[in-house]
Amino acid sequence: MRNFFKTGRSTVYANEAAVATSHPLSSLAALDVLRAGGNAVDAAIAAVAVQCVVDPHMTGIGGDCFALYTPKGEGVPITLNGSGKAPAAAEVEWYIDKGMTELPLDSPHAVTVPGAIAAWCRLLEDHGTRPLGELLQPAIRLAEEGYRLQPRVARDWEQYGGRLKNDPTSMAVFMPGGVAPQQGDLHRQPKLAATLRKIAEGGRDAFYTGEIAEDAVARLNELGGLHTLEDFASAEAEYVTPVTTNYRGYDVYECPPNGQGLGVLMMLNALEGYDLSPDAMSEEDRIHLFAEINKQIYHHRDHLFGDPVKASIPVEQLLSPEWAAWARSNVDMAKAGTPTVWPQVAHTDTVYLCVVDKDGNAISFINSIFHQFGSTITTPKGGFLLHNRGAQFSLQKGHPNAIAPNKRPLHTIIPGMLMKDGRTVAPFGVMGGQYQVMGHVELLTNIIDRGMDVQQAMEAPRSFAYKGALELEPEYPPALLEAMLARGHTAKWSADPLGGSQMIWIDRDRGVLAAASEPRKDGMALGY
């Protein structure tokens, strides 16, 4: 039971259906679709389209998406990879010859072909019940008539809007008068509204062929990009086989590489060798343990993960009991260590939402333009930002994630699905770029190991060890920071809130849905 003397949110309980997103207008759009008889896929498409308008620094139609879907809440989740590919001309030698060692975040070379619209259309065609044109109407209306900036959106907009300074079109759309709009301000995107109308009428082809694609390719080419109309025309979403592991009786499903969901499963396998309950492990030990395992996960990810169509990814070995035991053997509970790659395999801001409908269909859905405001490049006529997911590519020859023609980059965005005995327990996900692996683990262990309900699990303070630093949210007591420093961590207070999560827990014994939404964002859980 929640302590009502403390600030926070209540879990939302519902009989028929529930939705959780990081923006109130997105949640409302999804609920409207559900109450009108649409299913979980319909609601998810309506919700994400709205979010592509009202949360433009986090997501957009110029980005990518992934989804896990369980019809009737049973069986292995249908897994859709909606990530786009590098141009057909993207040979790694071309970039090396130009003296590049990495792909700049605001470069046209960081733009892979956007995969989101292809994924929406494929998912809706195969599993939805309502036409795309109908589901896009709320987003079109908000883009044309305007929407009010919510507090977290406005905070991030002001903080990161300066990234747009080199793109005149972006500045005109998102920084009118050279300043970021403030919370409560009305913001309109009429060009985006017109683009969404074309997609509503023409579907996938309206985005990847014709004037929308021509506008995007022309702008990218003007900036030096290698993209062609053929690259856009060939974009498609693909169904793939999820990766999974069992954690304390629950089956956890993630999208396979090129996503980083494999890292979640690796970390859970390693952690299963410890008792993480509050009675058995102190908070200091738990944060230290998470940091030590997490460093190993990200080290392996950065060395081994990539597009499995273009590189060999040792998935089975990394999910083996041997790897988990090796990872545990590298943990010294008294001091911080240095991560290494297991010798047996060594070689040389996003939005998330979930919906459960009255028929038990459950969807875990994530859509992103990667960094805040993506590549910062806005299409002049189309009025939408292009993502910069290609910045995740390596320019090291032979690396599993090295850029190559028609190759997908390593992705940070990962929807999750929790199941037990072949039935869905909870669609869940955590936004937050690189943090997402750690975010999935913290959310699940808070519930499974520490006995929290779904909302409490989201409101608990977070930690993240990445790139040599251990970040702690300032909700932790100062003594914890001192304890981590004493163990040799480069510990510091996090400047930004870590991540943003959503989850809907299906309690079949009681016949109730328990939905929760991230307090670090503006959104909400709703149900009926």
Image: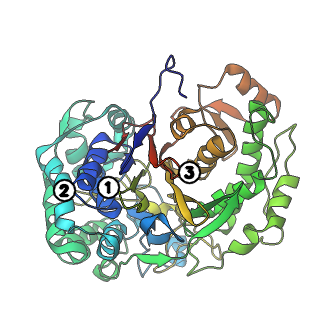
Residue at the image point whose x is 38% and y is 59% from the top: 387
Decide: marks 3, 1 in contact (CB < 8 A)? no
Q: Which label number is shown at residue 192? A: 2
Q: First in sequence: mark 3 or mark 1? A: 1
Residue at the image point whose x is 43% and y is 81% from the top: 89
Q: Which label number is shown at residue 48? A: 1
- Note whether residue 17 is visible: yes
Decide: marks 3, 2 in contact (CB < 8 A)? no
Residue 329 against residue 402 in the figure, above or below: above
* Image position, residue 225 (x, y; %): 36, 70
**Which sits in the foreground, 464 or 97?**
464
Q: First in sequence: mark 1 or mark 2? A: 1
Q: CA distance from mark 3 to mark 1?
A: 19 Å
| Secondary structure found at label 3 | helix
| Secondary structure found at label 2 | helix
- Note whether residue 189 is visible: no
Q: Can you identify the residue that label 3 sits on? A: 436
Q: Which label number is shown at residue 116? A: none
For residue 94, side relative to residue 422 (left or right): left
Dot 1 amino acid type:
Val
Decide: marks 1, 2 in contact (CB < 8 A)? no
| Secondary structure found at label 1 | helix
**Which sits in the foreground, 438 or 28?**
28
Dot 3 amino acid type:
Gln
Q: First in sequence: mark 3 or mark 2? A: 2
* Image position, residue 353 (x, y; %): 40, 52
